[in-house]
Image: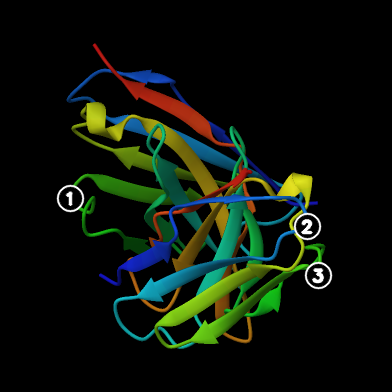
Amino acid sequence: QLQLQESGPGLVKPSETLSLTCTVSGGSISSSSYYWGWIRQPPGKGLEWIGSIYYSGSTYYNPSLKSRVTISVDTSKNQFSLKLSSVTAADTAVYYCARRGSSFDYYYMDVWGKGTTVTVSS
Amino acid sequence: DIQLTQSPSFLSASVGDRVTITCRASQGISSYLAWYQQKPGKAPKLLIYAASTLQSGVPSRFSGSGSGTEFTLTISSLQPEDFATYYCQQLNSYPRTFGGGTKVEIK
């Protein structure tokens, strides 16, 4: 079945760029039915939607992060990626990638990666 | 942005109890609402979408209702494996937003 796996550095220095990749296995990222997204969760806090991307490259971003976020897709590798620039300690979180599915135009995030912890510290 | 307010934020209940969690949206979102369950150290798991449609494989003791601005998640008979944190999410407009969460603990 479809699986998502996040990868990337677990420690990033303040002011640098956080870079994560989500590898999709057991299915194609190029399916017309799905968007692919990033969500994060600071320690002990709730979930925050970061943004999403379609296989064509069309993106949506959270305005609160938009100036610092770039999400891209590599269909040849069945991967999509997150870059978050100028990080601070407030960006320390577990980062999840997830699939956004739909049924009769109702949407949901139905497949999630296990998450990867990113700590921002010098 | 659409704000989602969940209540209560914390709930203490016993096995077998009927539990209801409320999610209120700051503006109408039709039925574009999903519910997730998250256990410590794990990714969220989709329970319900379209406000009331049970995701495949989710036990029937979970149900959702509502439309517009007020929604509920009900667990008809709480089981030991249901102790977790529950989140609502609106998928009516961007940015997608989540409620603050409701932690269900053992009484």
**Amino acid type, mark 2:** Gly
| Quadrant occupied by the C terminus of chain A | top left
Query: Badge 2: how crowded within 10 Å, few (<14), some, or many (20+)?
Result: few
Colour convention: rainbow
Circle 2 or circle 1, nearest the eye: 2
- Quadrant location of residue A42? top left
Residue at the disc numbered 3: B60
User: At 74% from the left edge and 57% from the top edge, which residue is drawn?
Assistant: B78
Distance (Cα) linking label 2 and label 1: 48 Å
Mark 1 lies on a secondary structure that is loop
Task: Using residue B76 as the reference point, say whether residue A29 is left or right of it.
Answer: left
Q: Mark 2 lies on which chain?
A: B
Image position, residue B103 (x, y; %): 52, 48
Image position, residue A91 (x, y; %): 29, 34
Task: Using residue B96 as the reference point, say whether residue A103 is left or right of it.
Answer: right
- The numbered mark at residue B16 is 2
